[in-house]
Image: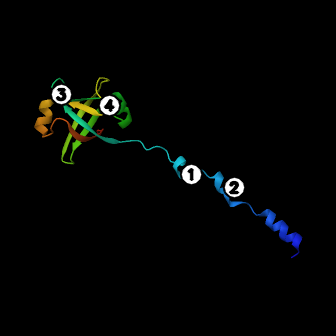
Amino acid sequence: MSENEKEKIIERKVDIKALVAVIPPASSLGKEKIRRERRIRVRAIAEVKEGFAKINPTLASELGITSALEIVVARKRKLKLTAIVDENIPPNEVWCNTDQLREEGIADNSIATVRAATK
């Protein structure tokens, strides 16, 4: 091989860094995961009717709750309730009936997992 041919081969090589710069990082490719459940405070409020739970609209849309929700405390106590969307509820709380929570053995201000109820 002559020196002229070697120079042509060197010129044909592509810079690896330039190729890698075209590929986006993995963090930008991944879509944000949809939250299916969240750990929040369960409050015992007497004004809430039995069988119902009041939830903030932002939290309800984030968790995909439309008609019913499920509250799970310590993987032992599970409660399915009809959801009432109310803007007056703080975003990190769900309000339930005092007597119903007491019957289920759930204390006021407990932290529980809240998710959309499965049918």
| 76 or 12, nearer to the observer | 12
Q: Quadrant of residue 114?
A: top left
Sequence order check, earlier mark of 3 and 4: 3
Q: Position of residue 92 (x, y in %)?
A: 30, 34
Q: In the structure shown, which secondary structural element does the residue marked by tag 2 occupy?
A: helix
Residue at the spot of label 3: 45
Residue at the spot of label 1: 25
The reply, left or right, for residue 27 in relation to residue 119 is: right
Mark pair 4, 2: CA separation: 47 Å
Give the residue type at disc 3. Ile
Give the residue type at disc 1. Pro
Tell me what residue is drawn at x 68 percent, y 60 percent: 16
Q: Position of residue 2 (x, y in %)?
A: 88, 75
Residue at the spot of label 2: 18
Q: Residues within 10 Å of mark 4 (few under 14, many from 20)?
A: some
Q: Residues within 10 Å of mark 1 (few under 14, many from 20)?
A: few
Give the residue type at disc 2. Ala
Give the residue type at disc 4. Pro
Tell me what residue is drawn at x 25 percent, y 32 percent: 94
Q: Position of residue 15 (x, y in %)?
A: 72, 60
